[in-house]
Image (cartoon, rainbow, N blue to C red):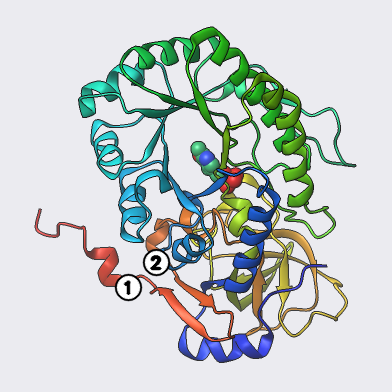
């Protein structure tokens, strides 16, 4: 059972001021979750979460997370600028980019960000771009092959294919990168890896941590480089489907602590700080896409046409992802109608749900599409001339704040050259 964080009465009030579709975020949920994460890693003195800005690049959200102690994980120039604008600079920025431009490295260096190098060739490129190699640098590791977890909870496999991923350096390359940078004055080294996405398992982070901790011990011995931080990146998932079990961040933190005490402490590396770059886990459950049913269509299947489309939330169209839908005011009605819930794009994959059992939907009903707080609005686009929606915040005191206005037709035309 998934319950929206807004009530029907609240939404009916909100739509008087902000027409659907819009994304709305839950300040209370965001803060409580961020505090649980912090508590789970409180045993590690240097711990910091760097929120993956790409998941929700919205100043009002980044500021809430900043107040909860989070930095920003950026991977582009505009994400760096956004982080600067909300006051996260210096070591509160982790710059985990790939295929990076000189301009991006220059801005990252100017802000004093921790630079996470995706490739061995970037050591030279970084030095040419900014004129030096920083004193503190991170390198991204790719172990190749496939990554699977032995222990999985019923029905859920954790499996991914690092060997097919464009990111990171091989084991040999990371050692070489460390040695070169040490010779150029780097004093503090970090390692990073992202091996599986949207994992529903309390074992993922501990397993990843063990791999990185063992690598850190080996690398420190082999290269003499002082490894002072380890970046566990993103990848902790959320249960998009109502029956899926949620991860328990306290159990995850404890699992990582065990690996830390088994591997790092005996090697005399008990001073290593940890950091994370979570996006989905921090925000996805605390966002809803709110849309209105505007048409029904009865052909070979039953369709409900809504006023949102894949431009507002691309995941179902792009990955076939499940997003739960609540028909507001009908929470207790039987789900005895089978619908495709579709947007208006001239693309047949523009469907938020296919063959979904829902209560009977009437025109004008408000639909809440769940778990859109991360990789939701941010993946939006303008296909078919669709305009980006507004983003709202449901504040802790129950009031509603505008975080981003909806795009207008003028915004859409602003970059076009009409007399060319
Ligand atoms: C996307 C990304 C993240 C965040 O991933 P989530 O699955 O949202 O936790 C973190 N780090 C890097 C480098 C990424 O590309």
Residue at (46%, 89%) from the top-left corner?
A: 17
SS of the residue under disc 2: loop
Ligand 1 rendered quadrant: top right
Residue at (51%, 61%) from the top-left corner?
A: 65
Check disc 1 and report the residue beneath it: 408
On the picture, is 358 further left or further right than 236? Answer: right
Q: Position of residue 72 (x, y in %)?
A: 45, 50
Determine whether the beta carbon of the residue marked 2 sits less than 8 angstroms from the nearest atom of ligand 1. no
Above or below 175: residue 333: below
Q: Nearer the viewer, residue 161 or 149?
A: 149
Q: Quadrant of residue 105?
A: top left
Q: CA distance from mark 2 to mark 1?
A: 7 Å
Residue at (27%, 67%) from the top-left corner?
A: 411
Callouts 2 and 1 close, C-beta under 8 Å: yes
Q: Position of residue 33 (x, y in %)?
A: 66, 61
Check disc 2 and report the residue beneath it: 387
Q: Residue furthest front?
A: 268
SS of the residue under disc 1: loop
On the picture, is 225 further left or further right than 208? Answer: left
């Amino acid at each position: 059972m998934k319950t929206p964080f807004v009530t029907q009465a609240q939404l009916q009030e909100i739509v008087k001021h902000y027409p659907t579709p819009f994304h709305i975020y839950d300040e209370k949920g965001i803060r409580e979750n961020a505090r649980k994460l912090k508590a789970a890693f409180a045993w590690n003195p240097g711990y910091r979460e760097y929120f993956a800005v790409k998941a929700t690049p919205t100043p009002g959200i980044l500021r809430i997370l900043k107040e909860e102690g989070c930095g920003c994980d950026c991977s582009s120039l505009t994400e760096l600028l956004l982080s600067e604008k909300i006051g996260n600079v210096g070591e509160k920025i982790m710059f985990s980019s790939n295929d990076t431009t000189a301009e991006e490295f220059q801005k990252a260096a100017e802000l004093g960000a921790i630079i996470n190098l995706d490739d061995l060739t970037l050591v030279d490129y970084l030095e040419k771009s900014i004129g030096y190699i920083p004193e503190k640098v991170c390198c991204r590791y790719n172990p190749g092959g496939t990554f699977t977890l032995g222990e999985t909870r019923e029905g859920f496999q954790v499996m991914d294919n690092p060997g097919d991923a464009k990111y990171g350096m091989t084991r040999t390359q990371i050692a070489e990168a460390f040695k070169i940078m040490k010779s150029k004055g780097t004093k503090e080294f970090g390692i990073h890896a992202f091996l599986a996405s949207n994992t529903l398992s309390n074992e993922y982070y501990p397993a990843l941590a063990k791999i990185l901790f063992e690598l850190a011990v080996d690398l420190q011995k082999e290269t003499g480089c002082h490894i002072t931080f380890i970046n566990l990146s993103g990848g902790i998932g959320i249960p998009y489907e109502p029956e899926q079990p949620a991860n328990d961040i306290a159990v995850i933190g404890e699992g990582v602590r065990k690996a830390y005490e088994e591997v790092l402490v005996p090697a005399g590396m008990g001073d290593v700080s940890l950091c994370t770059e979570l996006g989905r886990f921090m925000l996805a459950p605390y966002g809803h896409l709110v849309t209105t049913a505007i048409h029904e269509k009865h052909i070979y299947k039953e369709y409900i046409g809504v006023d949102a489309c894949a431009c507002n939330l691309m995941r179902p169209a792009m990955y076939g992802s499940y997003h739960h839908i609540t028909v507001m005011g009908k929470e207790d009605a039987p789900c005895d109608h089978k619908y495709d819930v579709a947007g208006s794009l001239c693309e047949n994959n523009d469907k938020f749900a296919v063959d979904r059992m829902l209560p009977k939907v009437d025109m004008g009903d408000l639909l809440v599409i769940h778990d859109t707080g991360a990789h939701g609005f941010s993946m939006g686009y303008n296909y078919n001339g669709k305009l980006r929606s507004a983003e709202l915040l449901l504040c802790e005191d129950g009031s509603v704040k505008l975080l981003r206005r909806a795009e207008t037709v003028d915004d859409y035309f602003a970059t076009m050259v009409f007399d060319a």
